Structures are given as C-alpha cells and as structure tokens.
Amino acid sequence: MTQPKYKRVVLKLSGEALAGEGGFGIHPPTIKKICDEIKEVHGLGIEIAIVVGGGNIWRGQVGSEMGMERAQADYMGMLATVMNALALQDCLENIDVPTRVQTSIEMRQIAEPYIRRKAVRHLEKGRVVIFAGGTGNPYFSTDTTAALRAAEIEADVIMMAKNNVDGVYSADPKLDTNAVKFDELTHLDLISKGLRVMDTTASSLSMDNDIPLVVFNLNQSGNIKRVAMGEVIGTTVRGKKYE
C-alpha cells in the first residue's frame, strides 16, 4: 500500500464550504460528506488539524455596511468559527472520529482553550483537532490562523480546500477566459503577483517557516485524500523555493 506523503496536516476549510449551494448556514449533507472524507484520511494514520472559517454565518463586510467598527465585526466572525467547529466536531464524532475543539478565545463550557502542547498531544493520540476562534485577535484572517497553527504544531503542509476552484489562476477563471492555472508557485510569487489565495500576512508567515500549501477543489470527491497521499492536483505553493 502506498504510504501517505504527509504525517501531520492542517486542513483549511472556509465557512462557505459547510453551507452547500445555499451559501449560508450549515448544510447537513455537505458537512457529512466533508466529514466522511476526513475520516478516510484519518484512517490512514495521518494527524489532522482543521482551521475553519465563519463566512457562512457572518462576514466582515456586513459589519462595515452596518457602520460597525472592524474589531467588533471580527470578534463576531470568531464566534461564527466556533459554531462551525462544534458542528464539525459533532459530525466527526458521530462517525467515530475522536475530535477536540480548541478556541483562541476561552469558552471552557464548550471547548478547550488553545494550548499548543495539548494540541500536539491530541494529534499524537490520533484525535482530530479543530482550531476555532481565529487567532483570537481582530484584523487577522483564518488564513493567517492556518499558517500560524501549522507553524506551531510543525505541520508538514497546509491543505487549502476551495469551493469549485481547482487551483491558483492568474485571474478569476469565472470572469477571465484567458486565466492561466499555475501548477506550482512560491509564497513570494503569491505576494509579488498579487494572487489572492490567502492574505499576505498568511503568505509571509508560511514563507518564513517554509510551510508548503496545496490549493485544491473541495467539491470533487476524494480530493482531500489525494492531496494527503501526495497526488499532484491543484496548485502547490512551496515554502521558500522550488524543488
């Protein structure tokens, strides 16, 4: 049997990934499908940490339209990520995948506070760890959270799941028919070319810590496993240099 390429991964899920075609809230069949794929990867012995967004429940621009200050809107977004994390936890544990939720904002009645050593220990014991609450600070995205947590737990890769997008393009392929798909880039390329895959803070953090990123289409069944096994799909963003 082919061995997985990665031993420890951070899977970055957007909030919208849980919403299905409705684009808002949590769509049970969609989250069930994602959890089934995570279970399959977990069964390979890969240690899995998840960072989930909250855009299916709350988006910052809504706060801007209301005249809300940025920090307040960001804190609301962090709470939205906790709701998504709890939904993922329940779904995973219903299919017998041991899971822990850790939040960067303390809410001890429903989740553990984020403690790096404890997170690593959970992973070593075969538990899926879901990081919720972003970094715990406003003005930082969940992309930055994924890069930060990946560095802290020494993950081998960040697996960035996108909705109906199979990699990184030179422009939005839905709007520009001449958009070119990249098979391989560096984090410096993302910054210099202005490719909006993740924010520049996240790209800089990943580059400084030499953490590779694989951008792939979540909507194609089996892709989470394919990336974890090292199959060449989507776009690979190297940490510092091309190999």
Image (tube, grey):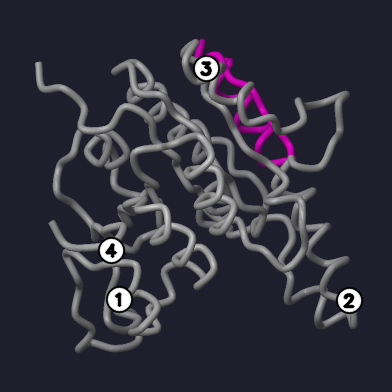
Q: How far apart are marks 3 and 1 (CA)?
A: 35 Å
Label 3 neighbourhood size at 10 Å, few (<14), some (14-19), many (20+)? some
Q: Is residue 240 visible?
A: yes
Tag 1's secondary structure? helix
Asked if the residue at tag 4 contacts the one at tag 1, i.e. Cβ–Cβ closer than 8 Å, the answer is no
Determine the image quadrant of residue 118. Answer: top right
Q: Which amino acid does label 4 sit on?
A: Gly
Asked if the residue at tag 4 contacts the one at tag 3, i.e. Cβ–Cβ closer than 8 Å, the answer is no
Q: Distance between the residues labelled 2 and 1?
A: 33 Å
Determine whether 167 is above or below 133 in the image. Answer: below
Residue at label 4? Answer: 167
Residue 151 position, x and y percent, is 48, 44
Residue 129 position, x and y percent, is 57, 27
Judge whether residue 185 is colored magenta: no
Residue at label 2? Answer: 69
Q: Distance between the residues labelled 1 and 4?
A: 14 Å
Determine whether 47 is above or below 165 in the image. Answer: above
Q: What residue type is labelled 2?
A: Glu
Q: How far apart are marks 3 and 4 (CA)?
A: 29 Å
Write the residue at 51% across / 56% down: 21
Residue at label 3? Answer: 127
Residue at label 1? Answer: 189
Q: Which amino acid does label 1 sit on?
A: Asp
Determine the image quadrant of residue 143. Answer: bottom right
Q: Which quarter of the rendering shows the N terminus?
A: top left
Tag 4's secondary structure? loop
Q: Is residue 90 visible?
A: no
